[in-house]
Image (tube, grey):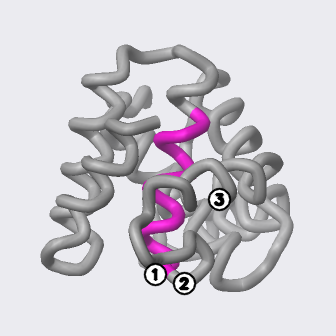
Amino acid sequence: MTKSRSVERQDAMRAVYIHLVRDQAIEEVLEDNAFISNVSDFIPKFEFGEEMLEVIHRAVARKEIYGLALNQYLNNWKFDRLGYIEQAIMLIAAAELELGIQAKVVVLDEAVRLAKEFADQDSYKFINGVLDAI
């Protein structure tokens, strides 16, 4: 079954979030999900197309670089002090923007949607502002 781009992006955010929380290699995160989702109905399986896999790998590989770039627009904050959900959303968005797979407006809208659904109440405002500035 093919998932929508929006669901893929949400799963990508979850995978990067797990990577950040556990400080675990992204390949291990994806392998763990595949195993657990096969033996249990509790955890849904991550299914990514090639483009989204590229986004995930780029986000993880360049998280320090993205963090430094995003720090320039985080007034009185540092990227590594943000919550892991906010970091994951911004890393996925930064990777998508760098790869140019989707238009900037689409990437920003999706990042805001994810922030409204999963992050702290007002996080979507600064996520939108920071990503719009880069």
Q: Residue at x 59, y 61 (%)?
A: 15
**Position in image of residue 7 (x %, y %):** 34, 42
**Position in image of residue 134 (x %, y %):** 46, 36
Q: Distance from label 3 to label 2 (Cα)?
A: 10 Å
Q: Distance from label 2 to label 1 (Cα)?
A: 7 Å
> Badge 3: how crowded within 10 Å, few (<14), some, or many (20+)?
some
For this view, does 130 lie left or right of residue 110?
right
Residue 51 colored in magenta in the image: no
Q: Is residue 94 above or below residue 13?
A: above
Where is residue 99, by image quadrant?
top right
Residue holding disc 3: 67
In front of the other: 31 or 85: 85
Q: Indicate the amino acid at tag 1.
A: Gly
Q: Residue at x 61, y 26 (%)?
A: 98
What secondary structure is marked by label 1?
A: loop
**Position in image of residue 30 (x %, y %):** 72, 58
Choose the circle earlier in sequence order: 3 or 2: 3
Q: Indicate the amino acid at tag 2.
A: Arg
Q: Distance from label 1 to label 3 (Cα)?
A: 13 Å
Where is residue 74, by image quadrant?
bottom left
Choose the circle earlier in sequence order: 1 or 3: 3
Residue 92 colored in magenta in the image: yes
Give the magenta part as a residue range.
Answer: 82-95
Residue holding disc 1: 83
Q: Quadrant of the N terminus?
A: top left
Q: Residue at x 73, y 66 (%)?
A: 29
Count of marks, rendered view: 3
Using the image, tell me which numbered label, if any, was put on residue 81. 2
Magenta segment, prevailing SS (helix, strand or loop) = helix
